[in-house]
Amino acid sequence: MTLSTLTLPSPSSDRRRWLALVVICFGQFMIVLDSTIVNVALASIQRDLHFTQADLTWVVNAYLITFGSLLLLAGRAGDLIGRKKVFLGGVVLFTAASVLCGLAQDPAALIAARFLQGAGGALSSGVILALIVTGFPGPAERAQAMSVFTFVVAGGGSIGLLAGGLLTQWVNWHWIFFINLPVGVVTFWLGSVLIDETEGIGLRQGVDLVGSVLVTAAMVLGVYSIVTAAEYGWASVHTLGFGGAAVTLLASFLVLEGRITNPIMPLRILRIRSLVGASVARAMLATGMFATFFLGTLYLQHVRGYSAIGTGLAFLPWSISLGVLSLGITARLMHRFGPRRTLIPGMVAIVAALVLMANTGQNASYFPELFGAYLLFGIGAGTSFMPLVTIAMSEVPPQDAGLASGIANVSMQISAAIGLAALGTISSGHSTALVAQGYSLSSALTGGYQLSFGIAAACVAVGLLVVLVVLRPLGARHDAPVTSREWAEGTAEAA
């Protein structure tokens, strides 16, 4: 497929492209639905399967480890053998693993199934951005497509929060996984019919399996060292040993990628400043986002005594504001001001929201304190994630779109796994120390959550600094608004 073919789709293919986009978004919807629905049910899962507080993070991290570790392989596999094949294969694996999660009767079975579920999520999610970027190459139509994509993500988050609460409280937590079965079946069926296969560059030069193993092992060991740091100590031989092994494997991976003919991650991709800078900023945002959901859920249920349904309703200001902005408001802001000028206020809003949460006490009222923090976070997320994706993919050649999609996603997912593990450990450790000092359990838990929210705010502030320094305008690339003609053409196609 040539660049001219990508940029000049025939009129008869336009409707099919937009229908295919809806199907692709269904795949992402299933992944986002699973993420938020699990967070709401964590307390019930902990009680039913007798998880310890430290081990509970593995319900999330087991998924995040395989998801983040396999994204590069998934993205590159899409470039090599075709993105439709990889996407549909991921949908099948994710759906099957979801059923296994629902059938789990002990912690080991659930964690093992979550590892498989993460692998399926990586295969499908690893090529989604590439499918959108190559299918909608024009600036205006891409903005419209990204609006649809972001709206589905927000919708998945909203439905997941509510469905998780309803299913957990009225039936049981097992059904939060079974809900993926009908969505997965429909997505696979429609995707087989509507999504056009991309022509892969082939396997003539082989597949970098060694590199895939190295980077996966590095991520697994790195997250494991952080998750178990509270038990063994941050300066223990155990923690430093596994952490050092992770760093060594990651360094070996980078050396290997610079020497072989067909690496999973050609190092030339790292010369694209917009991709690298935006990926780092997304990584910092992920830390704040996952801290908000995971620790925020525990705060609402363990400190404030919210039910599963009440927790889902409490997060509605976040999901509704994000969804409203994704209906086209953020795309229009990008059209008028450019991605970078839209992004900066959004990240400032997220930092402010996390600072508010870091100062929320155990007796804080929902309105206006928690409501305001979640609303501000939703507004910030709604004006941050789309511009970051747009900037990240803006200078990537079409033949490397799958790899770039993997890099953009892996930075976010691995940071989320490591950040969640670290913040969960820090929160737990600080709460334990406060209890030893004579604080009540509720006050100690609140203190632990507050400290972690403060650290999360600092992480997002670092991401903002990256945007200001690394993603400063080069000519007019990052801040150039879409022309009125391009916008009108893209809007007409979307309609």
Image (spheres, grey):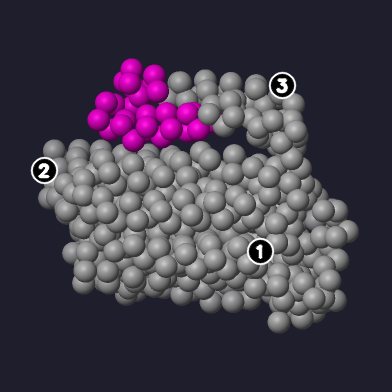
Amino acid type shown at disc 2: Gly
**What's the residue type where badge 3 is placed?**
Arg
Q: CA distance from mark 3 to mark 2?
A: 57 Å
In the figure, is residue 292 to the left or right of 465? left
Q: Is residue 407 visible?
A: no
Residue located at (56% from left, 55% from top): 88
Give the label, 2 or 1, closer to the camera: 1
Q: Secondary structure at mark 1?
A: loop
Q: Label 1 neighbourhood size at 10 Å, few (<14), some (14-19), many (20+)?
A: many
Q: How far apart, in angstroms, are the residues tagged by discs 2 and 1?
A: 60 Å
Q: Give neighbour class at mark 3: few <14, some 14-19, many 20+ (Cα, 10 Å).
A: few
Q: Residues within 10 Å of mark 2 (few under 14, many from 20)?
A: few
Tell me which label, 3 or 2, sits earlier in the chain.
3
* Quarter-of-image position of residue 338: bottom right
Horizontally, residue 354 falls left or right of residue 25, namely left
Q: Look at mark 1 in the image and give the residue it sits on.
A: 195
Q: Earlier in the sequence, mark 2 or mark 1?
A: 1
Question: Over which residues does the magenta segment extend?
Answer: 215-242
> Does residue 265 appear left or right of residue 451 in this picture?
right
Residue at point 63%, 76% (across, down): 328
Residue under label 2 = 438
Nearer the observer, 446 or 167: 167
Q: Position of residue 59 (x, y in %)?
A: 32, 47
Q: Is residue 231 visible?
A: yes
Give the amino acid type for the residue marked by disc 1 in the picture. Ile
* Residue annotated with mark 3: 259
Mark nearest the camera among 1 and 3 is 1
